[in-house]
Image (spheres, rainbow, N blue to C red):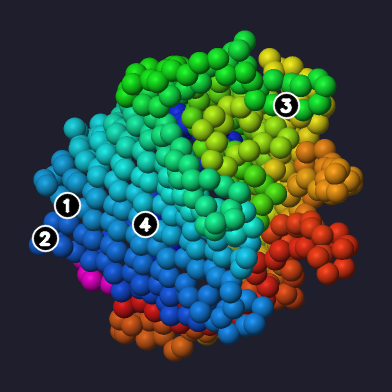
Amino acid sequence: MFNADAIKDIKLYKGGIPARFGGRVSSVLDIRQKDGNSKNFNLTGGLGIISSRLTAEGPILNKKGTFLIAGRGSYAHLFMKAIEDLKDDSAYFYDLNLKSNYEINSTNKLFLSGYYGRDFFKLSKIVENNYGNLSGNLRWNHIFNDKLFSNLSLIYSKYDYQVILDFVKLDWIAEIKNLNIKYDLKYYVSDKFKLDFGLSGINYKFNPGEVKPTAPDSPINYLKLDQKRAFEGGAYVSAEHKLTNKLTIQYGLRYSTFTRLGGQPLSSYSNNSPVVYNNELDIYEQGIETSETDYKNNEKIKAFGNFEPRLALSYQLNKTSSVKAGYTKSTQYINLLSNTTSATPLDVWAPSGQFIDPQISNQYALGYFKNINNKMYSLEAEVYYKTTDNRVDYIDGANLIGNNNIETEILNGESKSYGLEFLLRKNKGRFTGWFAYTLSKSEQRTLGGKAGGPGINNGDWYNTAYDRTHDFSLTGVYKYNDKWTFSSNFIFQTGRPVTYPNAQYQYEEMSIASYSDRNESRLPEYHRIDVSATYTPNKKPENRWKGEWVFGIYNLYNRKNAASISFAQNTDTGINEATRTAIFGVIPSITYNFKF
């Protein structure tokens, strides 16, 4: 997913999320780019039959600054055209990383970084999808003294996507832009006590997009959806306190705000209910619209505010083992709705407002860590339990495409997830590797609430789209000698939940499908094996040019893992059929990596 040549550090926060992070109820992946080499000009890259990459870095401005620029691109889609069954399909990506800095003086430094990436995916006569991210960050680092320093950042980002659905003949283009300013400070009170505190503000602009028909017989009419605007603010303070030689505690508090702003018309509904339950037809349908209010730009529609406490403890039992525990409360003000039955998910982002409350989660985690046999092995285990309020889901038969009033298609509910994560690593020797296993459950419940009726699945708990009972991987690396290294990994995951038709009936010469309960079925299990061999020619320390060859096979036994399963009638035989869509089979690769 990321260009490793441009990355300095990656941290994944799951159990105890620091107070400086907010706006999401999931985990946090904190990615830091390299600053660039301050002494010499370097080139790093790789040439392969599937993709290639190149990174350049070095000093600039009389060594008062540095730069780094890294690019990647894949071109496997060019070879797909030579295969009869794949000649009309396509899948490729490219991305670009940039970072530079300049030292103004001993206490002030400027950083400029950016990223641009784009992915393309096409299944002939079904779907075509391309999406990408653009971001830029200007940061001023200031050192007040040897205990206090700050970072002032101005950040711009844009996410946009285009989906072309051939089977309904439509083209959908949408984007989300945000401008973020934040000020973070660190204060080292002592060797045993450190403070983090700061402020942030994000201005959102949601463009649900344009929906265009792609053929004269398309059932879709042209529609430009109303843009949505919002502002999210946050303030936090966090402390890391080493109470004893064995006990360290991190505690903090974040306060977040969210204001839905005007700039578009909003509908009002009878009894303030955008969704109502029809007892006669046993379905949910749109509420009775009573009026429409045209809010002016930046006029406040609705505001929210939430306190988010954070706590993490780490206690060292002895020289080789420790335990940790954490509690995180977090709030998410933007909501994602996905049609998970499609070959490519259709994303609808809806900000909190009059009819959508922010998601609020509470997560508890307890973990254990141990080094074994003088750090030859390490063992990690963690259990967690998490609840989320105001989890939204769409009603049966919801129209998510080109809908200006998305509140008429959703109900509010709750979710819970819990599980056990286990990791055993071998860290030393000619053979290294790890075994990772997660046993988990993720469920949600959506009642009728104010709309009335039984809710989704009669108000019972049902699997979320992200539920995977079993998820494990086995990875091994064997260093045969100074020239050859072999590696392999095996991945297994329980198939994700989906909703299948379970019956059909005839109505006025039309065949109507009847569906099972929401997410009652699953796709087949996902599994594959990858192998690789790395050959490093004779190493000469005096040579600046260093290279290696990597030979690999992805999905060694050509498993046809299902991205989706669709149901339709065969026009030739008249028989109903299920069709599995698998994206990648076995893929051999050869790459030459170099560094100069």
The first of marks 3 and 4 along the sequence is 4
- Looking at the image, tell me whether mark 3 or mark 2 is earlier in sequence order: 2
Q: Amino acid at mark 4?
A: Tyr
- The segment highlighted magenta reads 38-42
For discs 3 and 2, the disc positioned in front in the rendered view: 3
Q: CA distance from mark 3 to mark 2?
A: 65 Å
Pick whichever of labels 3 and 1 is earlier in the sequence. Answer: 1
Bin the neighbour count of mark 1 within 10 Å (Cα to Cα): few under 14, some 14-19, many 20 and up: some
> Does residue 308 appear to the left or right of 521 in the view shown?
left
Residue designated by label 2: 61
State if disc 2 and disc 1 touch (CB < 8 Å). yes
Q: Residues within 10 Å of mark 2 (few under 14, many from 20)?
A: few
Mark 3 or 1, closer to the camera: 3
> Considering only order in the chain, which callout, 4 or 2, is on the residue closer to the N terminus?
2
Residue at position x 81%, y 26% in the image? 281
Instruction: Look at the image and tell me in which quarter the C terminus lies.
Output: bottom left
- Residue at image mark 1: 102
Choose mark 2 or mark 4, whichever is in front. Answer: 4
Mark 3 in CB contact with mark 1 (< 8 angstroms):
no
Q: Amino acid at mark 2?
A: Leu
Q: Are marks 4 and 1 in contact (CB under 8 Å)?
A: no
Q: Which mark sits nearer the N-terminus, 1 or 2?
A: 2
